[in-house]
Amino acid sequence: MKYILTTLVIFTLLIRPLSAQDISIGAVAGPNFSTFITELFDGQFRIAFHAGLVVKLELSEKWTIRPEFLYSQQGMTWRDGDAKIRRCNDYFGIPMLMQWTPNEKTAILFGPGIGILLKSVEINEYPGYYDEVDVMDEYNKVDVGLNLGFEYHLNTKLSIGIRYYNAIMNANIPYEFTNAHFSIPVSYMF
């Protein structure tokens, strides 16, 4: 809870002086390649997607505050022969990014992110068997982490990037593992 309050306080303090600044809104979407970082097991990436809204609040010619409001599919896949176990977690994510634009074509993005767990299921599959179980109780309802990314502007409205997110708190309650994912966001500003 203290992470949510801290994020909201920082956001409020930064928004107040921006009333006369340029504000633009856009859409962002793209694939996620997510996993859990742990020593307990060795899994593969879950390939899924994220989509949502982006708000850009210009501070200066080179600096922008960029909160995003995303639906993000995350998790991990384990394979053992013909058997496959998937953990599928869906989050409402709020990356609070700073954007530094050294030139008109590129930008560096960094900042904290918070995710609210919406859904968590474990899917067990092997030939002739399929089972889907709700495992929401095994996960923390809030995920907090850090984002680092790069963005290339194709034109004034459209951009593509690459971003890495690494959680700083455990995602799962009984075990010690954290969320991590790479994403390829495509943004379009209206």
Image (cartoon, helix red, strand yellow):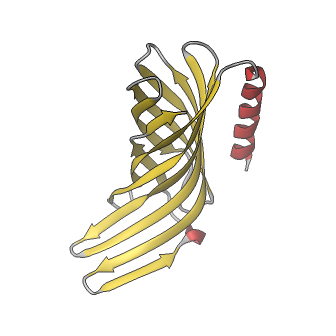
In the rendered image, residue 54, in percent from the top left (x then y), is placed at 57, 37
Viewer-side residue, 149 vs 190: 190
Q: Is residue 36 visible?
A: no
- Seen as rendered, the residue at the extreme front is 190
The residue lying furthest to the left in this view is 81
Residue at the spot x=40%, y=52% of the render?
A: 34
> Horizontally, is 44 left or right of 140 in the view?
left
165 or 59: nearer the viewer:
59
Q: Is residue 2 visible?
A: yes
* Quarter of the figure that contains the C terminus: top right
Judge left or right: residue 50 versus residue 96: left
Front in this rendered view, residue 74 or 64: 64
Q: Is residue 105 left or right of residue 121?
A: left
Please name the residue shown 33% across and 60% down the image: 43
In the rendered view, would you say 161 is above or below 168? Answer: above
Residue at horizontal 53%, vertical 38%? 146
Where is residue 20 shown, x and y percent of the image? 74, 18
- When the figure is inspected, residue 96 is found, relative to residue 62, above or below; the finding is below
Residue at 47 percent across and 33 percent down: it is 148
Q: Count the marks.
A: 0
Residue 168 x, y percent position in the rendering = 54, 44
Q: Is residue 170 above or below residue 160?
A: below
